[in-house]
Structures are given as structure tokens and as C-alpha cells.
């Protein structure tokens, strides 16, 4: 605890607060997400040190996830995918004059879920890192391979297109020079001659991230038209006052939902919507009055919001201990470490104890600031959902272009990369390309190649991937289980559609 407190400075607190408030705005406006918030602000961290950068980005992450409950309750539109189940009971409560009560119940539940997951991160990530630190190149390759199998579970709709998108991401990650230090020949690959001068080092990660999430969203919204439909302003007077006694019989629901959210976050690729849906289902199964779920009861709001905020700390566990991004938001956080010259993975926590402590402090602060800001100012924050997009999106576009240009010391091609991937993501989605699998493939593809080549250089035979150690055998079991479960889920989904 003392080590955590030594990291507390006014600057860290200010950046966490700015991040949380910015994240709430992004989460509260339909069409904008926590992932987009982190992507847009990532270039800003270029001017910050690693502690300050993580304070800002974790604040955005927590604020973005939490802000999704505002439109979910007031407009019946989930601000983030993980807030889908919040609409089930939150919106009916708002229609019955209990909008403020529903919002405050969701905010308190978000706090409990966030703190619970932060504690899980603090205790479990170092233990997992201590195991992973003993891995050779073989085990590291198998870990990456396991992460790549998650691409299938990340697929939405067509698993085949999800796998194709992931493989396309891997292919894009290999563009550029095949570095001699990675076992290569030092020559460029996957490039036409006219592309070699600008793409010798491949596509820069940060412009790619911003293009995929920020620019693609702006183009998509522009295509729909920025003209806002008139939205119903719900009355935020307290017909039924919020009281902390609303949680008197909800302790088990809170802890169960927080646990589910943290566990789902720990599993790469499953996502916040699955966490909140599973939590909501369990709350209904254990409820004494399950028939009331969906009609406007606090139980449903508590289950959904505790689970989706429990996801935040859980998703950071595989990222920091194994170097595996569990979803698109944690994948973007890799960009922050890359920008600061750090690599996440088994060595991270032991080799960077000060950064680790700073992260834990920022995560705890972000949850506390989120609660303080939203709980006491929710009436004013709720108006964010009515801010016109034609004002917000041009500002975001300019921030994205300036950020992409500045992040690598003023390389103009980074702006071109930003626009290429923005247009590609917008057009690709229409053709079935799935962005989350593509991003995971792009981030992990280069690492997979390095560990594969290094394994062969060290041991000289393919059989080493199957006989190296009991850990390798266990990882193969996980890989096969992941593939098998995904295929089973796809077959089950297909049968349900046919029926």
C-alpha cells in the first residue's frame, strides 16, 4: 500500500480525472465507445511519461465503460456493447420516473465491479507472470497461437470471415523489412517497388489503431448523416429516491456479477456483452421473482453494471502477465507501452515494478473518480447524450490527424496510414471484414513469427512444439479446447438459425 501511495501526485490525479470525464462523454454518446476514446487520446500520451500516459488511458477506459449506462437507461440505446443488458431494466425504470435512481444504482454497481476487478488484477497477474517468465520460445509461440485461436470466438456472425479477418491482420503485420535480428534476411517483403521507401518499416501501430476505430466511425456516421433525430428528454425528477438500502439484499448479486465480469475479462476474446449477459442471466436464475426481471427492477441494472466494470481489471490480467490483448481496448493499450519503449508480457511486472504500482493506483483512482463525478453530477452528465455529433466528430477528426502526424516525429505517411485504414475499416465492414479479429492478428502476427523462427533456430525440429515440456502439452490442450468450443458454438448457432 505504501508503494502505491508513493505514486500519488497531483498530476496523476488530474490526468485520471480528465481521462474519466473524457471517457464518460465517449461512453455516453451512442456510436462512440471506450475503445474509440483510448484510440483518439493515444497520441496525446506522446508528450507524457509512462505513469502519466497510463493514468490518462486507464481513466478513459473506466470512464468509457461506465458512461455507457447513461444512454442505456435514458434512451434505451447501449452506449457500449457491455451495456446492452442495462437497457432491460434501466429504461423501464426511467420511464416510470426513476431515471436518477436507476443511474445511481448503476454507478454504485460499476464502482463495486471496478474495485473488485482491480483487486483481482493486483493478486493474480503477478502470480501468472511468475509462471510465464519460465517459458521458452516454444511456450511463447504457443501462447500467441492460443491467443490467435481466440480470433474465432471474437467473430461476429460468420466465423469464417472472422478467421479471414484475423489472417489478414497477420499478413498486414508482416509488411516491411524482414529483420535479421528476428531470423530474417533483411529484405523487404509483401511490397511493390514503389511502396518500399515509405513502408520499409511496415505500418505504424498507432495510426492503424486510430484509423480503424476513430476515422472509420466518423466516415460511417457521415454516411448516415450528421443530422440528429429529435430525442425524447426523459424527466429526471426523483419519483422514487435513490437510497443505499436499495443494495440491502443485493450483496450476493453484486459479488457474483463482479466475479463473472472479472472472469470473462480474463478470457481473451469473450467480451463485455457476454459478461453482462451471463451476469444478468444468473441474476434472473437466482432471483426470488424472476418474472419481474425486465420490467424495471434494480437487480438487473446491478447485475449488468457490476459485470461490465468487472471486465476492466480482468481484461488487463492476460495483457500484463502474458502480453495477450483480450479485446480491442486492451489491444490499443499496447500502443501506449510501445510509444514509451516498453513491452508487456511475463517480464513486465517484475522488471517494471514502479510502472505496475502506478497502473494499480491509476485503476483504483479511476474507479473512485468515476463514482464521485457520476454519482454527484449525474443530472448534468446526462445532458451529454444530447450534444450534436456534427460538433463532436470534426473535433475528433482533427485530433486524430494531428496525433497520427506527431506520434512518430512528424511523418506524413502516418496520416496516409490513418486514412487508409479508416476507409478500409469502413468499407471492409460492409464486405464482412471484422475489425476486432483483424486488430488482434495485426498486433500478434509479428510476435508469432519471431517466436516460431527462434524456436526452430534453437531446437531445429518441428516436433519440439509438441514435446518441449508439460507446459507445451497443456497449451496444446487449451488451443484445441478453444478451437473445439468455438466450432461447437458456431454449429449450435447455425442449428438455432435453421430452426
Image (spheres, rainbow, N blue to C red):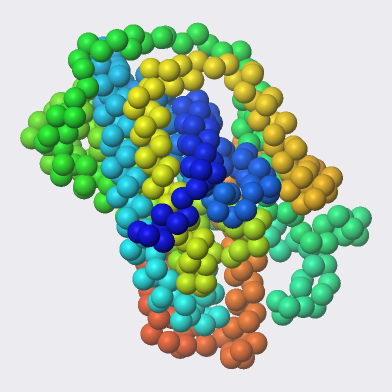
54 relative to 131 in the view: left or right: right
Position above or below: 192 against 20 = below
241 relative to 433 in the view: left or right: left
The residue depicted at 66 percent of the width and 43 percent of the height is 44
The residue depicted at 76 percent of the width and 59 percent of the height is 202
Residue 171 in which image quadrant:
bottom right
Residue furthest right as drawn: 194
Residue closer to the observer: 333 or 143: 333
Image coordinates for residue 286, horizontal then vertical, percent: 13, 41
The residue depicted at 14 percent of the width and 29 percent of the height is 245
Residue closer to the observer: 491 or 428: 428
Residue 77 in which image quadrant:
top left
11 relative to 226 in the view: left or right: left
Image coordinates for residue 401, horizontal then vertical, percent: 74, 37
Residue closer to the observer: 162 or 182: 182
Asked whether residue 302 is in view, the answer is yes
Residue furthest left as drawn: 288
The residue depicted at 67 percent of the width and 26 percent of the height is 395
Position above or below: 342 against 472 = above
Image coordinates for residue 49, horizontal then vertical, percent: 62, 53
Residue closer to the observer: 174 or 97: 97
Asked whether residue 328 is in view, the answer is no
Position above or below: 285 against 447 = above
483 relative to 90 in the view: left or right: right
User: Which quadrant, please, contains the C terminus?
Assistant: top left
Image coordinates for residue 299, horizontal then vertical, percent: 20, 32
User: Which quadrant, please, contains the N terminus?
Assistant: bottom left
Amino acid at each position: 500500500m505504501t508503494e502505491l501511495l508513493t505514486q500519488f501526485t497531483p498530476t496523476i490525479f488530474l490526468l485520471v480525472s480528465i481521462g474519466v470525464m473524457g471517457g464518460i462523454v465517449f461512453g455516453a454518446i451512442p456510436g462512440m465507445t471506450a475503445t474509440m476514446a483510448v484510440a483518439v487520446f493515444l497520441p496525446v500520451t506522446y508528450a507524457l511519461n509512462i505513469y502519466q500516459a497510463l493514468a490518462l488511458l486507464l481513466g478513459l477506459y473506466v470512464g468509457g465503460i461506465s458512461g455507457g449506462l447513461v444512454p442505456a437507461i435514458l434512451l434505451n440505446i447501449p452506449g457500449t456493447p457491455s451495456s446492452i443488458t442495462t437497457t432491460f431494466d434501466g429504461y423501464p425504470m426511467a420511464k416510470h420516473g426513476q431515471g436518477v435512481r436507476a443511474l445511481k444504482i448503476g454507478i454504485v454497481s460499476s464502482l463495486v465491479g471496478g474495485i473488485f476487478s482491480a483487486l483481482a488484477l493486483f493478486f493474480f497477474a503477478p502470480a501468472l507472470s511468475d509462471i510465464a517468465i519460465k517459458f521458452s520460445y516454444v511456450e511463447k509461440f504457443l501462447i500467441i497461437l492460443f491467443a490467435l485461436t481466440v480470433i474465432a470466438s471474437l467473430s461476429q456472425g460468420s466465423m469464417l470471415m472472422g478467421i479471414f479477418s484475423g489472417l489478414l491482420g497477420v499478413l498486414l503485420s508482416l509488411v516491411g523489412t524482414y529483420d535479421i535480428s528476428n531470423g530474417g534476411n533483411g529484405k523487404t517483403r509483401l511490397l511493390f517497388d514503389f511502396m518500399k521507401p515509405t513502408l520499409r518499416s511496415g505500418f505504424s501501430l498507432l495510426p492503424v489503431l486510430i484509423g480503424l476505430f476513430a476515422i472509420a466511425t466518423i466516415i460511417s456516421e457521415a454516411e448516415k448523416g450528421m443530422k440528429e433525430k429529435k430525442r425524447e428528454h426523459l424527466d429526471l425528477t426523483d419519483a422514487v429516491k435513490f437510497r443505499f438500502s436499495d443494495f440491502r439484499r443485493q450483496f450476493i448479486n453484486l459479488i457474483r456479477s463482479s466475479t463473472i465480469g472479472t472472469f470473462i475479462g480474463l478470457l481473451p476474446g469473450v467480451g463485455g456483452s457476454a459478461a453482462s449477459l451471463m451476469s444478468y442471466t444468473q441474476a434472473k436464475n437466482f432471483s426470488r421473482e424472476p418474472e419481474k426481471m425486465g420490467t424495471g427492477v434494480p437487480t438487473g441494472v446491478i447485475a449488468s453494471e457490476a459485470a461490465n466494470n468487472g471486465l476492466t481489471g480482468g481484461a488487463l490480467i492476460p495483457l500484463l502477465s502474458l502480453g495477450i490483448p483480450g479485446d480491442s481496448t486492451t489491444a490499443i493499450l499496447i500502443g501506449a507501452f510501445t510509444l514509451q519503449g516498453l513491452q508487456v508480457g511475463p517480464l513486465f511486472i517484475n522488471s517494471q515494478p514502479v510502472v505496475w504500482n502506478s497502473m494499480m493506483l491509476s485503476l483504483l483512482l479511476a474507479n473512485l473518480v468515476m463514482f464521485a463525478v457520476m454519482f454527484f453530477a449525474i443530472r448534468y452528465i446526462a445532458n451529454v447524450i444530447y450534444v450534436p455529433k456534427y460538433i463532436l466528430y470534426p473535433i475528433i477528426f482533427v485530433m486524430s490527424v494531428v496525433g497520427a502526424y506527431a506520434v512518430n516525429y512528424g511523418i506524413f505517411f502516418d496520416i496516409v496510414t490513418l486514412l487508409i485504414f479508416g476507409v478500409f475499416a469502413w468499407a471492409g465492414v460492409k464486405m464482412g471484414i471484422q475489425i476486432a479479429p483483424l486488430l488482434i492478428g495485426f498486433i500478434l502476427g509479428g510476435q508469432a513469427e519471431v517466436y516460431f523462427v527462434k524456436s526452430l533456430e534453437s531446437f531445429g525440429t518441428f516436433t519440439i512444439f509438441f514435446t518441449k515440456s508439460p507446459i507445451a502439452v497443456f497449451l496444446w490442450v487449451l488451443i484445441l479446447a478453444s478451437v473445439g468450443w468455438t466450432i461447437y458454438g458456431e454449429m449450435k448457432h447455425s442449428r438455432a438459425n435453421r430452426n
